[in-house]
Amino acid sequence: MSDWEASSDEDSGAAGRPPFSVAAAPLLWQPPVAPSRSHASAEDGRGRRGSEKWREAAAGSLQGEEWEPRGAGGSWGSVEVAGQWPPRAAAAAVRHARDPAAPLCLHLDSALVGALIDRGGAKIRELEESSGARIQVLKGTYEAEVKIFGSITVQNKAKMLIEDTVTRLGQNYIRGGTEKAKHLDLIKPENTLQKSVINWASIRENKARYEAMKWADLPPVEKNFYKESSRTASMSQEEVELWRKENNNIICNDLKEGEKRCIPNPVCKFEDVFEHYPDVMANIRKAGFEKPTPIQSQAWPIILQGIDLIGIAQTGTGKTLAYLMPGFIHLDSQPIPRDQRGGPGMLVLAPTRELALQVEAECSKYTYKGIKSICIYGGGDRKGQINEVTKGVDIVIATPGRLNDLQMNSFINLKSITYLVLDEADRMLDMGFEPQIMKILIDVRPDRQTVMTSATWPDGVRRLAKSYLKNPMIVYVGTLDLAAVDTVKQRVVVIPEEEKRTFTRYFIDSMKPKDKVIIFVGKKLTADDLASDFGLQGIPVQSLHGNREQCDREQALDDFKKGRVRILIATDLASRGLDVHDITHVFNFDFPRNIEEYIHRVGRTGRAGRTGEAVTLVTKNDWRVASELIDILERANQAVPNELISMAERYKQFQLKKEIERDVRRPQRRPPKEL
Ligand code: AMP
């Protein structure tokens, strides 16, 4: 299938679900004055915000006692609803009939609800004041539900005012006059029950109608800005292949189904790709870069042609500039001027605050035609971020949780995004951000250009790519295999748990003045504990983990980057993405959860042409990973300690014994009776 996005909708059953199932009713809006909301924005350790939990609870309540029955002649979009859907609707209906103060529920098309909830809820407050009712809006994918609280009189008054507001909007919304607006089923009051028949064809039709309406007013997107230089065009196939082999063994593929397109030749010099963009060239000269990195050479001609790209590359490969430079050109070359698009044009989603800030720092190093960027992340100053966004920016770099918060509260318009980047997609999946990404992308136009980067290419990332990219090309650069990293010397020390601290102190004492080390630990508590231990011993250290305040995390990283401290004690928060060139040592105080994380950690050193050393403490508790570790060490021609080999053997024996015991315990099958 060529249209992956459409297929993913089908697959996920999104089109086939009633718009107000819990999964499809993610957006709950209330006027910001509501007191319980103001303090619900902090992210917890896993990137889930307080408001997120509150919202989930609210979504959950849609199935509970608070539900109002769907009314006669009413529907959920085009879903013909029954007394049994939602399951407790019948009970709620009875309650509604007896209790005059039960909320009155109206349904209207999501596209029209903007009139009620924009300007931070000023309109709702106005309606509340005029009617005396309290109004709550639940924004769903296709429909919004409006609940009106108060006496029957004020409910009716509020309903009339809402109808009036929305009808006026409906007439404005449909270009070409009011005729079509009349056919729009704007408001569907709920009064009585209906039988349970779900009209799926109608749901699909309605979805298509809604989609068409949602994107109808948007200007066209320009995507192709590539002018191949004569030098690039004249490369022979052999030259191209040799060049790719010699540049981190680049592998490219066209993932479009059906007839494959020609993969553009790599660009060997900056001029080959940016000679028509002098401002980009000026930035590159200012940065002093000599030549494009492998990912840049192959990604730029693909992205600049307007093709979606998956870049399998780690931090440190120059992947940020690989998507930023074409992004600048894309933003500035759209038919509608930037300040008239009603919102940002480029969105970069990043998994952690650190990475988001790092991308923002990289982005603001370059000046391109006055393009403004902002970083939106949980733990940062929410009010300040809202102020910046509403003033107008071109590029938003965000962690999914906080962006989803601002989107849900209508502080940011994502419909203007035409260039989307999903940075470190594998990490975003590991951190459980997929639901937030899904919600965010509902509001991003489907005909955008999308670039995705990932250090690995597991099934989850493939699925994400299939859902959100269209006919992409893929470029693999380098490899996660440490056999290829001959710049890092790996040393493994098998040691009893209780001697780890003494050994670490010995290691620190033997550090040279120019050495810089990240000490990786398994738990936040251990990080704090070690940091305070060393602090008491007069050793300057910083620590980085998810329980620290955002400002402390930023300070720790800055101190380490700038060399004010030369020892950073960190959890795996720092194992990927951090770009500090001069780390000479990685010290694994605790062995990581898995071997992939070990590879990521070790990759923090030996960067940008330098050499590095990784020291790893292994205790008998780590015996599970011993054989995988041996494999990595051998492939990278590193010394393998005998204790590690015997540890791996002991674990193998242990597994074998367990298997035999299991077999013995398993009931023996009787031989079949002879006939
Ligand atoms: P990234 O992989 O995006 O985290 O980039 C790692 C570092 O490489 C950043 O500090 C960039 O400024 C730097 N960088 C990006 N492109 C180049 C290049 N062509 N030559 C040298 N350094 C670069």
Image: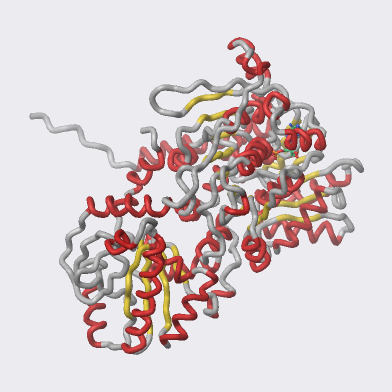
Residue at (17, 69) in percent of width and height: 194
Q: Can residue 55 be seen here?
A: yes
Q: Quadrant of residue 650?
A: top right
- The residue positioned 60% from the left and 20% from the top of the image is 265
Q: Quadrant of the N terminus?
A: top left
Q: Quadrant of residue 232?
A: top right
Q: Does 668 sit above or below residue 498? A: above
- Position of 261 with respect to 298 (left or right) is left
Viewer-proximal residue among 13 and 136: 136
Is 568 left, or right, of 243 in this rendering?
A: right
Residue in the image at 80% along x and 40% along y: 583
Q: Position of residue 292 (x, y in %)?
A: 71, 28
Q: Residue furthest front?
A: 177
Which x, y percent locates residue 394? 64, 51
Q: Quadrant of ligand 1?
A: top right
Above or below, comparing residue 669 to residue 237 in the picture: below
Q: Position of residue 662 (x, y in %)?
A: 39, 41
Evaluate whether residue 652 shows in this view: no
- In the image, is residue 305 above or below residue 181? above
Q: Return the residue found at the far right.
A: 513
Q: Position of residue 403 (x, y in %)?
A: 57, 58
Residue in the foreground of this view, choosing between 400 and 321: 321
Query: Disc count in the image?
Result: 0
Q: Is residue 327 left or right of residue 543?
A: left
Residue closer to the observer: 502 or 267: 267
